């Protein structure tokens, strides 16, 4: 009887804690082509200001940008004035320099208070804009990250991204040179 009662107590305690599960984010880098193809908006812009919109552990940073060129998202938002991100890098927020560089920014549209916003995270792609060859709009090539060897392509239009093996992300040769 004691074993049955112990089981029942443990079961009921476990059942009551089911809503307290914590979910975490991950900021795994993605290939520039995937970021371009899977983003709602892609722009080249210079950051001209920043403002902390909400302070605290889950704060939001708003960057004011001067849009130089739009590559994707004409139908969603023809001109981007602000981009939003988490204030904390631990929540996949991005830190951008004000009045220093032009960035290639990829992001997703989000609705908030009946307003469309461009939201960016580290999981999207933000890079200094130098001379970038952007992917064409057909997106026929599929990028597959390789985290450990051996890696094999499963179709002729699949490319193995090996930057993850040695550099864990964007700083590898393939990402820097848009090669696959």
Image: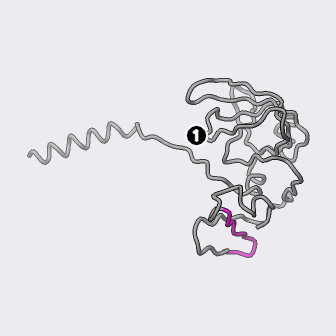
Q: How is the image coloured?
A: one colour
Q: Residue at x 74, y 39 (%)?
A: 109
Q: Relative to the observer, which residue lies in front, 163 or 145?
A: 163
* Tally of numbered discs: 1
Position above or below: 151 against 68: below
Location of mark 1 (residue): 90
Position above or below: 164 against 53: below
Find residue 110 and report its horizontal and vertical position in percent: 70, 36
The C terminus: image quadrant = bottom right
Q: Residue at x 51, y 43 (%)?
A: 24
- In this picture, which residue range is highlighted in magenta? 154-163
- Badge 1: how crowded within 10 Å, few (<14), some, or many (20+)? few
Q: Which residue appears farthest toward the left when viewing the image?
A: 1
Q: Is residue 127 left or right of residue 11?
A: right
Position above or below: 95 against 164: above
Q: Relative to the observer, which residue lies in front, 44 or 177?
A: 177
Find residue 40 and report its horizontal and vertical position in percent: 77, 45
Q: Is residue 135 left or right of residue 19?
A: right
Q: Is residue 69 magenta?
A: no
Q: Is residue 179 left or right of residue 111?
A: right
Q: Is residue 84 left or right of residue 150?
A: right
Q: Is residue 155 magenta?
A: yes
Find residue 25 and report its horizontal and vertical position in percent: 56, 44
**Which of the 4 image quadrants contains residue 19?**
top left
User: Helix, strand, or loop for circle 1?
Assistant: helix
Q: Relative to the observer, which residue lies in front, 158 or 66?
A: 66
Q: Residue at x 73, y 65 (%)?
A: 142
Q: Residue at x 70, y 37 (%)?
A: 95
**Which of the 4 image quadrants contains residue 144?**
bottom right
Find residue 39 and report its horizontal and vertical position in percent: 75, 48
């Amino acid at each position: 009887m004691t074993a049955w009662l112990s089981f029942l107590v443990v079961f009921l305690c476990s059942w009551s804690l089911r809503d307290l599960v914590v979910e975490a984010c991950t900021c795994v880098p993605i290939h520039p082509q995937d970021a371009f193809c899977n983003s709602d908006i892609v722009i080249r812009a210079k950051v001209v200001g920043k403002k902390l919109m909400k302070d605290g552990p889950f704060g939001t940073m708003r960057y004011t940008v001067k849009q130089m060129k739009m590559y994707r998202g004409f139908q969603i938002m023809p001109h981007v004035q602000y981009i939003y991100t988490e204030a904390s890098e631990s929540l996949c927020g991005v830190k951008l320099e004000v009045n220093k560089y032009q960035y290639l920014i990829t992001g997703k549209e989000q609705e908030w208070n009946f307003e469309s916003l461009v939201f960016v995270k580290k999981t999207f792609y933000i890079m200094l804009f130098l001379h970038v060859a952007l992917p064409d709009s057909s997106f026929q090539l599929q990028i597959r990250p390789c985290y450990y060897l051996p890696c094999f392509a499963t179709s002729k239009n699949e490319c193995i991204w090996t930057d993850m093996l040695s550099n864990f992300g964007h700083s590898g040769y393939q990402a820097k040179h848009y090669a696959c």
